Amino acid sequence: MSKKLKVGIIGCGGIANGKHLPALSKIEEVEMVAFCDIVLERAEKAAKEYGVEGAKVYEDYKELLKDESIEVVHVLTPNREHSFISIDAMEAGKHVMCEKPMAKTYAEAQAMCEAAKRTGKKLTIGYQQRWRGNSQYLKKVCDNGELGEIYFAKAHAIRRRGVPTWGVFLNEEEQGGGPLIDIGTHALDLTLWMMNNYKPKMVVGNTFKKLSDQTDTANVFGPWNPEEYTVEDSAFGYIVMEDGAVIVLESSWALNSLQTGEAISSLCGVKGGADFVDGLRINYVKNNTMVIEKPDFNAGGVAYFDGKVMKAEDMECRAWIDAILNDTEVSTKPEQAAVVTQILEAIYESSKTGKPVYFN
């Protein structure tokens, strides 16, 4: 392994510039040496801002993968392309960080897992919400058994008016769906991870396309084009796990609700519960009294220190690069992400058929 990991970027759009490129640029052991995008100008711009001197740019990702010096690839394309680009990259000898969701379908996600095992290359999925300070704290609470058996949970991803109007977010063919696969995936991943429960038994789901034809939208990202809006505007799922635990998943980009929030979980266990409604709150009974505990994640109050901590995406990226450098297990395992995709696909399927989906 060279002293500096040579990284190639496939997809230089919003998630690349908003998350991955800034995070990678902060890691000394990384050199971004190649950038690919079907819009060459985006690759050129990213190479100029984040690449090493002489960084190469491509329109065809297969040409980038021919560079044997590249050890790591970040796949940051629309969802439709996640699986086959990731598999091609691993087959070409690269470790792969694939942005969420893992894939459009469970079959594609399984193929990615199989490729990782076959090639011996590391594969992880970009679920950075696990790395928030409150998420890390609650995960330790759960793993320590402080909530006891978690038998009921909610995964929340609700926006009142937050429809992304750029890129291909509204295109079902490119993305595989709307808010469920976009932000619902974060909430579900976080919830399954907290519960450490990856064995679904049955799913019932409904998707709705009720607001997408409206033109007076008050959307925070600007008005959407109803003719381009081919995905759901909200989706809901009821998930039963093999051990009997239940998860309710709710997701929307546009919903007439004042109870909003995304990438958050509510957990109910035998010994206690937790939620992110007002910061992280942990509830339990002590001395015959109902107690609410609110951890303080403010690191300020020290002279000459403003209390800033590493962003979740920076911590995720640091852990990913460390796993490669030290040849250790990735923090977000592809097998876990595949179950998220399996459940999301089942919600879409249940909504289409009007029937529950049962897993073998």
Image (cartoon, grey):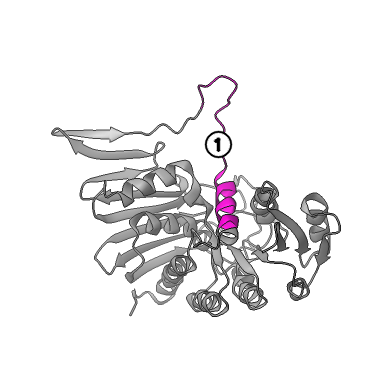
Q: Residue at x 59, y 74 (%)?
A: 83
Which of the two residues, 329 or 82, is positioned nearer the viewer here? 329
Q: Is residue 344 left or right of residue 42?
A: left
Which quadrant would the C terminus be assigned to in this image? bottom left
Magenta residues, as a range? 300-322
Question: Which residue bears the numbered disc 1?
Answer: 309
The amino acid marked with disc number 1 is Val
Query: From where the camera sits, is residue 259 visible?
Result: no
- 179 over 88 or under it: above or below: above
Q: Position of residue 320 (x, y in %)?
A: 57, 57
Corner quadrant of residue 125: bottom right
Query: From where the camera sits, is residue 200 visible?
Result: yes
Regarding mark 1 in the picture, which secondary structure is present there? loop
Q: Residue at x 54, y 29 (%)?
A: 307
Q: Position of residue 281 (x, y in %)?
A: 34, 38
- 229 over 289 or under it: above or below: below
Which of the two residues, 305 or 189, is positioned nearer the viewer here? 305
Q: Is residue 48 left or right of residue 294?
A: right
| Residue with the most extreme top position | 303
Corner quadrant of residue 8: bottom right
Q: Specify few, some or many for label 1: CA neighbours under 10 Å numbering under 14, 14-19, or 20 or more.
A: few
Q: Residue at x 44, y 59 (%)?
A: 189
Q: Position of residue 64 (x, y in %)?
A: 76, 71
Judge whether residue 308 is colored magenta: yes
Q: Position of residue 11 (x, y in %)?
A: 71, 63
Which quadrant would the N terminus be assigned to in this image? bottom right
Which of the two residues, 354 or 119, is positioned nearer the viewer here? 119
- 283 over 58 or under it: above or below: above
